Amino acid sequence: MNAVQDLSFIELIRHAHVLVQLLMALLFAISLMSWTYIFRKLFAIRAARRQTEQFERSFWAGGNLHTLHQSASSQRDQSGPLARIFEAGMGEFIKGKQASRDALDVGAVLDGARRAMRAAFHRELDQLDTHLNFLASVGSVSPYIGLLGTVWGIMNAFRGLANVQQATLATVAPGIAEALIATAIGLFAAIPAVVAYNRFTHDIDRLAIRFESFVEEFSNILQRQSR
C-alpha cells in the first residue's frame, strides 16, 4: 500500500480503493437526487399551503358557490389542491341535482359529492407524497452504503500492512482516513434526507387535516343547501 501523505479530501478520494470510489460516487449521485427532490418538494408544499390559504379566504368570504366553482374549474391547474377538492365535490353535487329532482335522492346526491371530494383528497395527498419514499430510503440506506465502503477500505488498508516491515500511525492513517470518508459521505446524504422527510411529512399531515376539515364543513353546507 502506498502511503498517501496529502490528507486532503480530494486526495483521499483519489487514492481510495476502486470499490470505495464507486460507493462514494453512488452516494454523491444519491445525495444530488435527494437535494433535487428536497427543493422540489419544498416549493410544492409552500405553493400548496399558499393556494390553500387563498382559496379558504375566497370560500369563507361568502361568495356564490357556483361562481367559485366556475373559477376553480377554469383555473384547475393553478387553483391549488383544496380548490380542486371543492371543484370535484361541487361538480358532482351539481350533476346529481340535475340528474334527479326527487327529494328522496338528496342523500344519494350528498354521498356522491362526498365520495368525489374524498377521491380528490386522496389524489392530492398522493401527489404531495411523491418522492417522500425516496427520501426515507436515502435516510435509512445511505449510512450503510457508506459503512460498507468504510469496512472495505479498512480491510484493504490492513491488507496493505502485510508488505510493511514496521506499522506506524503514519502508515495506517491515510488508509483509515480514505475509508472513513465513505461513512462521512453516507451521513452527508442521509441527514438532510431524514430531516426533510420528517419536516415534509409533518407539513403534509397538517395540510391533510385542513383538507379533511374542509370536506366535512363543505358537506354540511351542501346538506343545508339541498333542503
Image: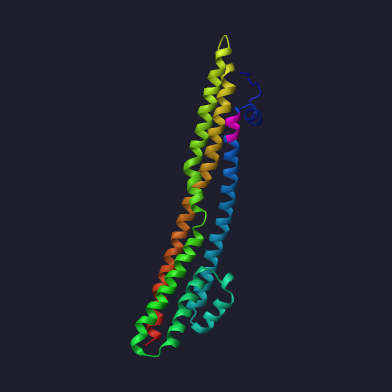
Position in image of residue 134 (x %, y %): 51, 49
For the view shown, which residue lies furthest in the left direction?
104
Position in image of residue 118 (x %, y %): 42, 70
For the view shown, which residue lies furthest in the top direction?
165
Position in image of residue 85 (x %, y %): 48, 72
- Find out whether residue 94 is within the magenta segment: no
| Nearest the eye: 218 or 22 | 22
Q: Is residue 41 left or right of residue 96?
A: right
As drawn, 29 above or below 102: above
Position in image of residue 119 (x %, y %): 44, 69
Residue at 51 percent of width and 49 percent of height: 135
Residue at 45 percent of width and 76 percent of height: 89
- Tell me the quarter of the image containing the C terminus: bottom left
- Which range of residues does the magenta coloring cover? 18-22
Name the colouring of the figure. rainbow
As drawn, 128 above or below 29: below
| Nearest the eye: 18 or 67 | 18
Residue at 52 percent of width and 35 percent of height: 146
Quarter location, residue 213: bottom left
